Image (cartoon, rainbow, N blue to C red):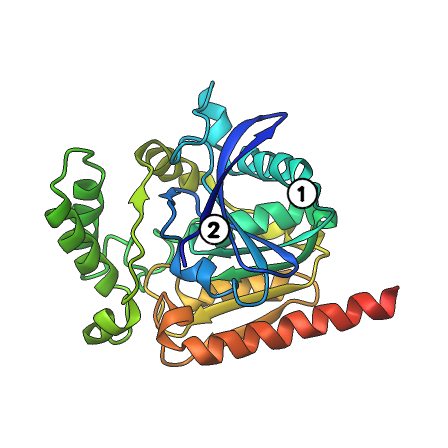
Amino acid sequence: MTWNQNFIETDRGTFEVFSKGDGPPLCVTHLYSEFNESGDYFADTFSESHTVYLVNLREAGRSDVSRAPHELFMIESVFDLESIRRALRINQWVFAGHSTGGMLACVYGIHASSSLRAMIAVGAAAREYGSSSEACIYHEEHPDYHLMQDYIETLKDPELDEKKRKFISEARTKLSLYKPEQYDNYFSKSIHKKMATARMNFFAREILQFDVTKQLHHVNAPTLVMCGKYDVQCPLVFSEEMAAEVPGAQLAVFNNSNHYPFLEEEQTFKRVVHQFIEEVNELSSFQL
């Protein structure tokens, strides 16, 4: 089943949003991914139980371009998401983010918790992670650092041959799997997406000074932090830090996963999410 394409007119511009599923509203995005009708593996995880809104942020896909550089900051992306939520007439939604989407979740929770029924951050960090942990593949001392950088720079090329793009994307992803030989099993759907180069380049600068750890105590939405034990992109220590700083946050660690626990341990991942959402629903009913 493909995702439905929508163009949402807001007071901050027009955004391309794909939707799928039936149930309570849940939003998914990523700081520099460009989504299309084929969807997203992470977002698909939630479409069985929620109406999922998969958002192309500014400069991604057919969403509006930025009018000034500052509009690509994470806080501005939160304001954009809020404008989309209001345009859809949604009072509260769950926000779920993987990797840089999880970083955005932290900013969202800090500044707009009242709009969140719950927050889910997977394989993420609340601060710059590349230079502070040699376990991170973006650290210069990591053995695969240069290979990863070469892959990223190559994928930024808009003229890259599609066959070569597919090959490099696969090789890049395998660096972040606990069992890379299982790649074809994990990524068996006809899902394909691109990198929004302008957003990726901006993120590479913003991340250098990113640190919201001292503000995480402002998050008052129910929070689930999830991470693979062997995550090489955002090592586990950063998820442990987030869970410790967000009041009442739950931490789920997947012992046979790297950066993609929602694929590497799919059934366990779904079970943890389902249990968390059930607890959120029970808490909401109790408060009413």
**Local secondary structure at mark 2:** helix
- Tag 2 near tag 1, CB within 8 Å: no
- Residue 267: give its label: none
- 29 vs 263: above or below: above
Residue located 77% across and 73% down the image: 282
| Cα–Cα gap, marks 2 and 1 | 15 Å
Residue located 15% across and 45% down the image: 162
Residue type indicated by callout 1 = His
How many marks on residues? 2
Quadrant placement of the N terminus? bottom left
Q: Residues within 10 Å of mark 2 (few under 14, many from 20)?
A: many
- Return the x and y of residue 103 as percentages of the image width and height: 50, 51
Residue located 47% across and 80% down the image: 268
The residue mark sitting in front, 2 or 1, is 2
- Residue 101: give its label: 2
Residue located 63% across and 72% down the image: 276
Could you say which is closer to the camera, residue 49 or residue 273? 49
The residue pinned by badge 1 equals: 111
- Return the x and y of residue 116 as percentages of the image width and height: 68, 52
- Return the x and y of residue 174 as percentages of the image width and height: 22, 65
**Local secondary structure at mark 1:** helix
Residue type indicated by callout 2 = Gly
Could you say which is closer to the camera, residue 55 or residue 180? 55
Q: Residues within 10 Å of mark 1 (few under 14, many from 20)?
A: some
Q: Which residue is farthest top? A: 67
Quadrant in which residue 277 is drawn: bottom right
Could you say which is closer to the camera, residue 100 or residue 285? 285
- Return the x and y of residue 283 as percentages of the image width and height: 78, 70
